[in-house]
Image (cartoon, rainbow, N blue to C red):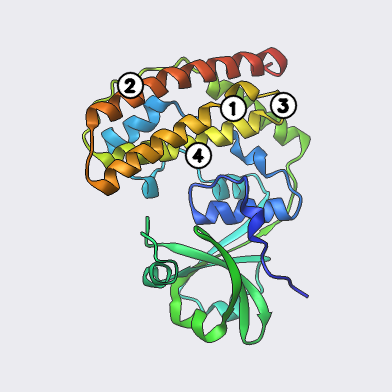
């Protein structure tokens, strides 16, 4: 018999979207080495900032880094299918996991939260003929929803996926070389002159997720205690910028100084990380 989703298993996973979080959740629950999927997660702070400022990216539309579900499918780790405007009752059994898009007004009303994007999904699986277990990633929530309610909030798209294969040694070696090469690239400094507080927040939002991924990936191979204080510093600056945004009292001079300081620390940390990884593992 199927059990309710365990929302605590979302701890210590770092997706850029609900679909990435659900994939990582599934791999973690089933005992697969999900952290190996973080191998394509390094971008310099300069590259991240340039994507936002030069290409008008937003957190919800950031395409500079490959989506984890695409990497997993490409490497034969999962079977995945996108479906639009299908009756989920007919297809709920096609895959082990099904993420269904729900109407944004439902999420806004249920959780009294500001939505970052309109294409929000719930992970579901059948409990019985009249109800489903569900998992929401942000805010974290799990429980049971009736078939009638799920039908009323369904927004016409779903993604089904099944974890098929573990990440073998050969693939792990390929992934390892990819991340060593990426963190070893010569850093280019960005001249920060930010004039939009949402852009500043989103640059930092992407950066801190990707750094958490890189540090956790490399932590499978080397001690990364020298990185310990850096993520909290990113979190503090992020909180500071979000506070300014919400209070509508933005100091761009302070924000740009904060980014310059973070950039120097970022380059320093990644230089140490690169040296340690190459010392032990680079070809």
| Quarter where residue 248 is shown | top left
- Residue 190's label in the rendered image is 2
- Residue 209's label in the rendered image is 4
Q: Which residue position holds label 1?
A: 228
Sequence-first tag of 2 and 3: 2
Sequence-first tag of 1 and 4: 4
Whether residue 150 is visible here, answered yes or no, is: yes
Q: Which residue position holds label 3?
A: 221
Q: Where residue 5 sits: x, y (%)?
A: 66, 65
Sequence-first tag of 1 and 3: 3
- Residue 113's label in the rendered image is none
Q: Residues within 10 Å of mark 1 (few under 14, many from 20)?
A: few
Query: What residue lies at 72% left-to-right and 16% top-to-bottom?
Result: 280
Which quadrant of the rendered structure holds the N terminus? bottom right
Instruction: Count how many numbered circles sit on residues in the image.
Output: 4
Instruction: Kindly indicate whether the residue at mark 3 contacts the one at mark 1 (C-beta within 8 angstroms).
Output: no
Q: Residues within 10 Å of mark 4 (few under 14, many from 20)?
A: some
């Amino acid at each position: 018999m199927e059990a309710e989703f365990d929302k605590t298993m979302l701890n210590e996973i770092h997706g850029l979207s609900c679909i990435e979080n659900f994939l990582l959740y599934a791999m973690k629950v089933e005992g697969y080495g999900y952290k190996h999927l973080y191998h394509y997660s390094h971008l310099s702070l300069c590259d991240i900032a340039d994507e936002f400022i030069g290409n008008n990216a937003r957190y919800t539309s950031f395409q500079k880094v490959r989506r984890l579900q695409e990497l997993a499918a490409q490497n034969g780790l999962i079977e995945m299918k996108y479906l639009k405007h299908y009756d989920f009752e007919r297809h709920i059994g096609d895959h082990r996991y099904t993420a269904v898009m729900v109407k944004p007004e439902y999420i806004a009303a249920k959780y009294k939260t500001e939505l970052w994007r309109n294409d929000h999904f719930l992970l579901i699986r059948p409990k019985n003929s009249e109800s489903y277990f569900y998992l929401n990633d942000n805010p974290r929530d799990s429980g049971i929803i009736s078939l009638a309610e799920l039908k009323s909030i369904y927004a016409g798209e779903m993604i089904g996926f099944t974890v098929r294969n573990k990440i073998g040694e050969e693939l792990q070696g390929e992934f390892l070389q990819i991340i060593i090469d990426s963190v070893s690239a010569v850093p280019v400094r960005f001249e920060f002159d930010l004039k939009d507080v949402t852009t500043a927040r989103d640059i930092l939002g992407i950066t801190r997720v990707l750094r958490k991924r890189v540090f956790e990936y490399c932590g499978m191979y080397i001690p990364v205690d020298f990185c310990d204080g850096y993520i909290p510093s990113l979190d503090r600056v992020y909180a500071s910028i979000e506070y300014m945004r919400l209070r509508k009292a933005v100091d761009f001079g302070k924000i740009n100084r904060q980014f310059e300081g973070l950039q120097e620390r970022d380059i320093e940390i990644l230089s140490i990380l690169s040296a340690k990884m190459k010392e032990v593992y680079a070809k």
